Amino acid sequence: QKEVEQNSGPLSVPEGAIASLNCTYSDRVSQSFFWYRQYSGKSPELIMSIYSNGDKEDGRFTAQLNKASQYVSLLIRDSQPSDSATYLCAVKNGNQFYFGTGTSLTVIP
Amino acid sequence: GAVVSQHPSWVICKSGTSVKIECRSLDFQATTMFWYRQFPKQSLMLMATSNEGSKATYEQGVEKDKFLINHASLTLSTLTVTSAHPEDSSFYICSARRGPGSSYEQYFGPGTRLTVT
């Protein structure tokens, strides 16, 4: 079983809609969770981090963490074509970071 | 902010030569740096973890004698691809993690695209 699993997509949403990206992790003791955005040909960029259960909002982005169910999600409100990218979920467990394979998001104008 | 730079951003070399890639954290001290490789349309693959002042920890299947890592200071780590071959052509990305007591977030460099001819 992989440490971090994501649906590879592609996920397509119309401009202005809410994009929902999901991630599950296998190790119950994981404490830190991150979402990265990676444009094609570029390196990943940290967009959200979350450490406790519940929601964390930053602009159009909301990260949601449910440790009991071992999932973390990212919601993008009012999706824009510029949000089209691959979104990577990462989980820190001890000294190790584990990345999912990423979900490709396309926002259709 | 947390800025990580890499140099060079793009390098073409001949088969059999060695290439050194530098990774620097510009505005924070990074006790730990990571080196990743990414092939087109594939996910990040962790190659090794380096801690300042100690030997790097390599992931399974990564040849430590081929990919030499030196984490000489809290702001600089280097990856040397020795005797490069065309199959080593890839996008190499470093990331740096702030020290203890921080949020442990990783910040990525812009990547180095290596082409071996």
Image: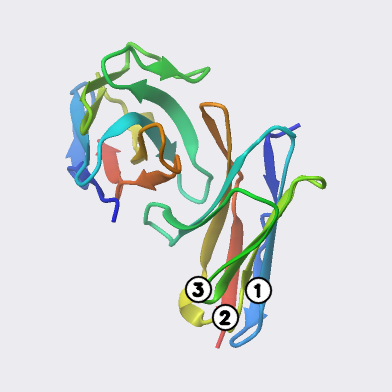
Residue at horizontal 29 percent and vertical 51 percent from the top? B2
Relative to residue A36, is residue B86 depicted above or below?
Answer: above
Q: Earlier in the sequence, mark 1 or mark 3?
A: 1
Q: Nearer the viewer, residue B49 or B92?
A: B49
Q: Are marks 1 and 3 in contact (CB under 8 Å)?
A: yes
Residue at horizontal 75 percent and vertical 34 percent from the top? A28
Q: Position of residue A51 (x, y in %)?
A: 60, 48
Q: As shown in the figure, which amino acid type bears the numbered disc 1? A: Ala
Mark 2 sits on what residue?
A: A79
Circle 2 crowding by C-alpha within 10 Å: few under 14, some 14–19, many from 20: many
Relative to residue B36, is residue A82 depicted above or below?
Answer: below
Q: CA distance from mark 1 to mark 3?
A: 10 Å
Q: Position of residue B117 (x, y in %)?
A: 25, 35
- Is B15 displayed left or right of B56 in the figure? left
Q: CA distance from mark 2 to mark 3?
A: 6 Å
- Is B48 displayed left or right of B112 in the figure? right
Q: Position of residue B29 (x, y in %)?
A: 25, 36
Q: Are marks 1 and 2 in contact (CB under 8 Å)?
A: yes
Relative to residue A46, is residue B106 depicted above or below?
Answer: above
Chain containing mark 1: A
* Furthest-front residue in this view: B101
Q: As shown in the figure, which amino acid type bears the numbered disc 2? A: Ser
Circle 1 crowding by C-alpha within 10 Å: few under 14, some 14–19, many from 20: many
Q: Position of residue A102 (x, y in %)?
A: 59, 52
Mark 1 sits on what residue?
A: A19
Which secondary structure, mark 3? helix
Mark 3 sits on what residue?
A: A83
Which secondary structure, mark 1? strand
Residue at horizontal 45 percent and vertical 43 percent from the top? B103
